[in-house]
Amino acid sequence: MPGKRKNTMDIRDVLRRIRQGQSDRAIAKEIGINRKTVGRYHTWAQEQGLLDGELPALDELQRLVEKSLNNDAPPQNESSVEPYRALVVKLRQQGVEIAATHERLRERGYDGSYASVYRFVRVHSSLRVKLPQPVPTRGSGSPKKWEQRTPAMAAGLTDHAWSLEKLLMCHVPAATG
């Protein structure tokens, strides 16, 4: 269950197993969660003094979890590249590769990852579809077997990949009703 928060019963089960002396690795394997998650609960339990004495009741444990464990940042809805959109569009129009674009952004104060820039500008390869017949490519390379698609192409909203510039220049009428 990657990315999912564990409920209080699951956390209590992890705590019970830690108190019985099971290793983090064994607990992770038996319960089916990441070993690092077990380690995080183990550290948290030590800090809270939960490894000695009676385990608190579920409602008390829930309050403790909410107060001291779940301080994750809310999910990010906007790319960290978004403030640099105009520059990215300009660089990509000039044919600057993604790695060089990332370096130019870093020169201007961007501290995000290359992967964030990559995701911001690339067609999603997981949306590709197999071509009925391989298409020859220029040169001596192997024939093209897959068609790359954007999310809009996969949804049937368009039949081609839009450049960032054309997408930004597109007028979308306001919704009515």
Image (cartoon, rainbow, N blue to C red):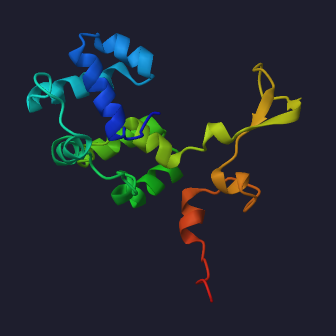
In the rendered image, residue 57, in percent from the top left (x then y), is placed at 21, 39
Residue 50: in sight, yes or no?
A: yes
Q: Nearer the viewer, residue 137 or 53?
A: 53
Identify which residue is drawn at 39% across, 36% down.
114
- Quarter of the image with the C terminus is bottom right
Q: Nearer the viewer, residue 169 or 119?
A: 119
Identify which residue is drawn at 19% across, 44% down.
60
Query: Above or below — where is 84 with respect to 35?
Result: below
Q: Nearer the viewer, residue 85 or 47?
A: 47
Dividing the picture into quadrants, the one containing residue 83 is bottom left
In the rendered image, residue 2, in percent from the top left (x then y), is placed at 45, 34
Identify which residue is drawn at 41% across, 42% down.
116
The furthest residue to the right: 133
Identify which residue is drawn at 18% across, 30% down.
55
Residue 94: in sight, yes or no?
A: no
In the rendered image, residue 16, in percent from the top left (x then y), is placed at 27, 22
Q: In this rendering, would 161 be left or right of 146? A: left
In the rendered image, residue 99, in percent from the top left (x then y), is placed at 42, 35
Dividing the picture into quadrants, the one containing residue 173 is bottom right
Query: Above or below — where is 174 with respect to 40?
Result: below
The furthest residue to the bottom: 177
